[in-house]
Structure formats: structure tokens, C-alpha cells
Image (cartoon, rainbow, N blue to C red):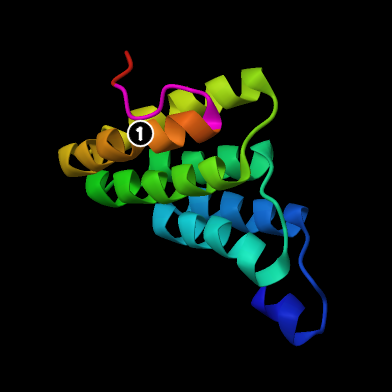
Amino acid sequence: LAEMEVAGLEPSVVSYATAINAAAKGNSSTAAAMLVNEMGPRWGLKPNEYVFTAAIAACENDPDDKTAADSAQRIVNVMAEIGIADEEVKQRLGKQVTVQLHRDSAAADEAASDSDSDEGKLGTGLGRQVEV
């Protein structure tokens, strides 16, 4: 993405999804969450289900429970901010991210305190324990 910017090219949602997928393969939920968070403010791009799926995969792959849970909360914040229209996608992403939120008890507690707001915006049960 940095090379694109240097070359005067604006990244697309596909560019970001690719970079986030690379972060997932590198087990870096921090990098994935950072990329998801910068898409809108920096370039005016709206993350889609592929971006969120790749970002959640980065959390799943991250060996550090606290980092993964913190990154998942940052991803949830973006999901809540932009909203997800497709009900099936919303439910699937909600289940996947909830598992990651509960990898660290402090992050799970924070997610529970934020969940009413996030759940209201997303219309799904975030922050609640799910069977894994």
C-alpha cells in the first residue's frame, strides 16, 4: 500500500483486503485492525465482508490472546460504525468476532460494556459468549 501511495496510486478495497489477508497469514491482528481502521478516514473506502473476514482471520491466527481480543474490538468498532446490511453476513461475522473478543477476559469485559452500543448498530449479539 505504501508503494502504491508513493507511485501516486490510490488503493482500492481489494488492495486493502489483500494487505489484510497478508497480515492474517503473518498472524498480525494489530496490522489488520490498523488497516481496517485507516481505510475510511484515509481513503474514503468502506470495508466489505471480505475485508472483515480477513481481519477476523488475523485475530484467529494471532497467538497472543490479548492482542487478538483488542484487535477484534477495534474491528467491531468499525463494523458498528459502517453497518452491515446483509443479515447472514452480519450474523456470521458477529459469531466469528465474538469468539475472538472472548480470548482475553479484560477485552471481553470491555466488549460487554460496549456491546449494547455495538449490538444496536450492528443488530447482532456481539460481546456474548458463544460455543466454540
Per the image, the residue denoted by label 1 is 115
Nearer to the camera, 76 or 100? 76
Say which quadrant the N terminus sits in.
Answer: bottom right
Q: Residue furthest top?
A: 131
Nearer to the camera, 26 or 75? 75
Q: Is residue 43 magenta?
A: no
Label 1: which secondary element = helix
Picture coordinates of residue 20 (x, y %)?
58, 54
Say which quadrant the C terminus sits in.
Answer: top left
Characterize the local packing of mark 1: few (<14), some (14-19) or many (20 or more) Cα atoms within 10 angstroms: many
Q: Is residue 77 above or below residue 40?
A: above
Question: Amino acid type of disc 1?
Answer: Ser
Residue 64 falls left or right of residue 18: left
Q: Residue furthest left?
A: 105
Nearer to the camera, 121 or 32? 121
Residue 107 falls left or right of residue 10: left
Q: Residue at x 48, y 40 (%)?
A: 56
Picture coordinates of residue 3 (x, y %)?
70, 79
Tell me if residue 28 can be seen.
no
Q: Residue at x 61, y 38 (%)?
A: 83
Tell me if residue 89 can be seen.
yes
Which of the 4 image quarters holds residue 60? top left
Q: Is residue 126 magenta?
A: yes
Picture coordinates of residue 86 (x, y %)?
69, 24
Picture coordinates of residue 6 (x, y %)?
73, 86
Q: Specify the segment rendered in magenta.
A: 122-128
Residue 34 falls left or right of residue 51: left
Q: Residue at x 42, y 22 (%)?
A: 125
